[in-house]
């Protein structure tokens, strides 16, 4: 006997096979996307850390510039202080120099010689004197005494002239003396 099945038979559909290159393309795309996200994240972190480093370095530079400004200001004030100190010391030294010069001039003055005039030239470095003496020997003694002094460097006798004053023969002479600093 023949059996005929009138009910439709369900056929199983064959699973469609996805070609290998499509699977490979999808996997490569997903892998590339993952690598791109990783690289983006890594570079984003580096950029952020570098920006933070630049900001901290800028802050340090600003702080150091303030310190440099303070140091240059200090150096300028220190130089001003030293200049003022030197001026004060120079004034102190020059204050006592005229007293020493007058003392030395009178200490070396022999009997028979008197000073008639004195002037200071070249800011106290040179002294001009006009004197009178009874004898030429007194003039020579005074010049030699001044040359032997530790305060005077050079003593020059400019002129010596014999003249008559009130019936007495006197010698009028002028000297130029360099004063040691």
Image (cartoon, rainbow, N blue to C red):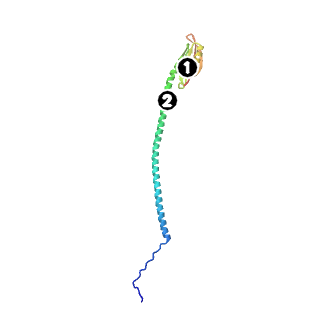
Q: Quadrant of residue 13?
A: bottom left
From this viewpoint, is residue 42 visible? yes
Left or right of 83, for residue 158 = right
From this viewpoint, is residue 116 visible? no
Residue 13 against residue 31 in the figure, above or below: below
- The residue that mark 1 highlights is 129
Q: Residue furthest top?
A: 167
Seen at 60% across and 14% down, the residue is: 137
Which mark lies nearer to you, 2 or 1?
2
- The residue that mark 2 highlights is 87
Considering only order in the chain, which callout, 1 or 2, is on the residue closer to the N terminus?
Answer: 2
Q: In the depicted view, which residue is nearer to us: 7 or 160?
A: 7
**For numbered disc 2, what is the local secondary structure?**
helix
Residue 66 - label: none
Mark 1: give few (<14), some (14-19) or many (20+) Cα within 10 Å. Answer: some
Residue 43, percent from left and from top: 47, 56
User: What whole-number distance in Å separates the C-alpha atoms at marks 2 and 1?
Assistant: 29 Å
**Number of callouts in the render?**
2
Q: Residue furthest front?
A: 1
Residue 45, percent from left and from top: 46, 55
Seen at 51% across and 22% down, the residue is: 98
Residue 82 against residue 41 in the figure, above or below: above
| Quarter of the picture holding the N terminus | bottom left
Seen at 48% across and 64% down, the residue is: 31
Mark 2 in CB contact with mark 1 (< 8 angstroms): no
Left or right of 110, for residue 81 = left
């Amino acid at each position: 006997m023949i059996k005929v099945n009138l009910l439709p038979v369900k056929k199983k559909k064959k699973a469609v096979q996805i070609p290998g290159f499509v699977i490979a393309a999808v996997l490569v795309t997903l892998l590339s996307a993952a690598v791109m996200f990783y690289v983006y994240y890594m570079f984003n972190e580096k950029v952020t850390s570098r920006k933070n480093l630049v900001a901290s370095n800028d802050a340090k530079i600003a702080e150091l510039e303030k310190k440099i400004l303070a140091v240059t200001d200090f150096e300028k004030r220190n130089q001003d202080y030293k200049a003022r100190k030197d001026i004060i010391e120079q004034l102190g030294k020059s204050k006592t120099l005229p007293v020493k010069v007058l003392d030395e001039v009178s200490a070396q003055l022999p009997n028979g010689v008197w000073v008639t005039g004195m002037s200071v030239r070249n800011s106290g470095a040179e002294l001009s004197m006009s004197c009178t003496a009874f004898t030429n020997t007194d003039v020579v003694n005074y010049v030699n005494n001044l040359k032997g002094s530790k305060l005077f460097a050079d003593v020059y006798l400019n002129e010596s002239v014999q003249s008559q004053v009130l019936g007495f023969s006197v010698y009028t002479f002028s000297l130029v003396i360099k004063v040691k600093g």
